[in-house]
Amino acid sequence: MTSAEKYIESKLEERRSSGIYRTLKPENDLIDFCSNDYLGFARSVALKSSIDLEVQNHPQSLNGSTGSRLLSGNLQYAEDLEKSIAAYHQYQAGLLFNSGYDANLGLLSSLALRGDTIILDELIHASAIDGARLSYANRYSFKHNDTGSLEAKLKLAKGNCYVVIESVYSMDGNTPPLLDILNIAERYGAHLIVDEAHAVGLYPKGLVTELGLQGKVFASLVTFGKALSGHGAIILGSDILRQYLINFARPFIYTTAASFHQLASIKMAYQLLNNAEPEIISLKNNIKLFKEQIKPESVYPLLNSDSPIQCIVFKSNDKARDIANILQNKGFDVRAILSPTVATGTERIRICLHAFNTANDINKLATIINQFINA
């Protein structure tokens, strides 16, 4: 074993011994309370058929894109799709990226320069943190959804300042005081960036557009791998921002473009989203039902969330893992979220609700959870 392999093995053993070793698991036949398929589009026969038909209607399309968009991989279809998505969310322009991770990386690493400032909510997604690190800008984090903490950091800002938040937080499921944050950012001349990854679906056009704030937000990020069941992401903002990213965002410039099939999947998912009111109503009803059925004790709190993401905090990796394993053995696909993914002492089970979950399944799940948190 080489010195590098010995180091790798030692780090893996640290993970094993501390109970946080990660492994991949194949698909299962458990009742889904785990995935980001909030509206059920991933299992939609209608969506699959419309994607197949769209591909058939473009027989000239290739299996792959053949290169980056700045070389051989650009399609008029992609540019038309960007325009239609931007119009749907009521922004001036948009630029497609191959994933939400790439989008955050490309936006933040290229936008803020040395001497500028990026201020992140402390619970922001890892991709935003990594993008900020690559920018070489001054970086601060503020307490989660705390406008006073944000203002204290804004007073330290230099250069161009960007405040980065999510509209629905992936590990807590809650939403920020978006208008208050926007007003504070404007007061200090800062630019607000909102990651809408988990909001689209609950709010068809995202929370920013739902609140009519798209004209004041500097940029929004929408991913297609959650409620839209596809893959990739788009950064929405001004036309000048789009042109800037085409010229300076390395994850856009130096990567192979999305295939036609991927683009068609995104287009057809948006068409389905236009007629998804029944699914959205079912999703909201299921969220309400779950919250009514869960009776948590204060020692194991249910985090405050009106989104599909509902979390019960068990405050230890072992306890969260044990409860998740019990639920899986009972037929429910519920996963534990362990430190270091979340902060030590906030380990939890994360329950994702969907439009397709039945009232019977939600009631059964809640009954089992209540037995353990109130034992």
Image (tube, grey):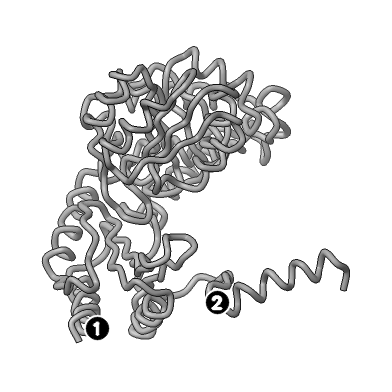
Q: Quadrant of residue 361?
A: bottom left
> Is 320 located above or below residue 232 in the figure?
below
> Who is closer to the viewer here, 74 or 123?
123
Q: Element at badge 2?
A: helix
Dot 1 amino acid type: Phe
Q: Give how far across and how far down residue 287 sits, in percent.
A: 19, 58
Q: Give how far across and how far down residue 265 sits, in percent.
A: 48, 41
Instruction: Please report whichever mark, 2 or 1, sits nearer to the chain's N-terminal start.
Output: 2
Q: Element at badge 1?
A: helix
Q: Which residue is mark 2?
A: 18
Disc 2 from disc 1: Cα separation: 24 Å
> Who is closer to the viewer here, 30 or 11?
11
Q: Give how far across and how far down residue 365 sits, in percent.
A: 24, 76
Q: Which residue is mark 1?
A: 372
Disc 2: CA contacts within 10 A as few (<14), some (14-19) or many (>=20): few
In the picture as drawn, the residue positioned furthest to the top comes out as 240
Residue in the picture at 40% in, 46% down = 122
> Is 274 located above or below residue 14 in the figure?
above
> Who is closer to the viewer here, 296 or 148?
148
Residue in the picture at 42% in, 40% down = 141
In the picture as drawn, the residue positioned furthest to the right comes out as 2
Q: Give how far across and how far down residue 254 sits, in percent.
A: 70, 31
Foreground mark, 2 or 1, reads 2
- Is residue 85 in sight in this rendering? no
Q: Are marks 2 and 1 in contact (CB under 8 Å)?
A: no
